[in-house]
Image (cartoon, grey):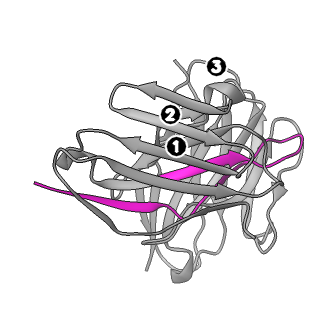
Amino acid sequence: GAVVSQHPSWVICKSGTSVKIECRSLDFQATTMFWYRQFPKQSLMLMATSNEGSKATYEQGVEKDKFLINHASLTLSTLTVTSAHPEDSSFYICSASYRVDYGYTFGSGTRLTVV
Amino acid sequence: QKEVEQNSGPLSVPEGAIASLNCTYSDRVSQSFFWYRQYSGKSPELIMSIYSNGDKEDGRFTAQLNKASQYVSLLIRDSQPSDSATYLCAAPYGGATNKLIFGTGTLLAVQP
């Protein structure tokens, strides 16, 4: 149980275009999901907390207009990287928790390469 | 002090030895802790969780929590080459959202 699916696994896009990443909780409802970014040889950095039916909460230093988050249902959150640039190339991972004491389950991640 | 801190390593141990991974935390995190394993290019997978002082064992893994010292550790017995990965300590940041905050991770290399 507590499976989180993330799509796509990898994407290559041209600089200036937008990319949408989907995160789904398959067997539970997630009112809150989390989006992380990980650069090579670095740890996971929390970008934002996605809240079902309301605005996302962004961490300090994360541009909310560049990283659009939508959490329209209890099983789906999307992250859209707008006007992507090469410096946005990274590994993006979503996470959700069925119950906090059960831990947090992660999606398989999306490797974004902007050329 | 960062919320969760780890020695980045790398930590190298011979096959069959005990690997000891350590993590310290600040007062700003909630008192539940998670150890994740992350292979290169993959997303993290949960190994252990611990909430109470003392030890918690699961197979070859033992998590230890010392709240007085604000210290949590992970021991891996009979280390195998397949255990080679980055181990991440994490805790929910205090507050309503319980967002999970990670340490920088410790790279473990088990030498055959």
Q: Secondary structure at mark 1?
A: strand
- Residue in view at x 78 percent, y 75 percent: A61
Residue B35: mark: 1
Mark toward the start of the polypeptide (1 vs 2): 1
The magenta span reads B88-112
Q: Is residue B101 magenta?
A: yes
Give the percent coordinates (x, y) of residue A38: 53, 65
Q: Nearer the viewer, mark 1 or mark 3?
A: 1
Which residue was labeled with disc 2? B48
What amino acid is at disc 3?
A: Phe
> In this rendering, is residue A102 above or below B41?
above
Q: Nearer the viewer, residue A33 or A100?
A: A100
- Residue in view at x 59 percent, y 79 percent: A16
> In this rendering, is residue A87 above or below A50?
below
Which residue was labeled with disc 3? A28
Residue A9: mark: none
- Residue in view at x 78 percent, y 36 percent: A72
What amino acid is at disc 2?
A: Met
Q: Residues within 10 Å of mark 1 (few under 14, many from 20)?
A: many
Q: Secondary structure at mark 2?
A: strand
Q: Is residue B33 magenta?
A: no
In the picture provided, is A58 more to the left or to the right than B80?
A: right
> Do the residues under discs 1 and 2 have CB atoms within 8 angstroms?
yes
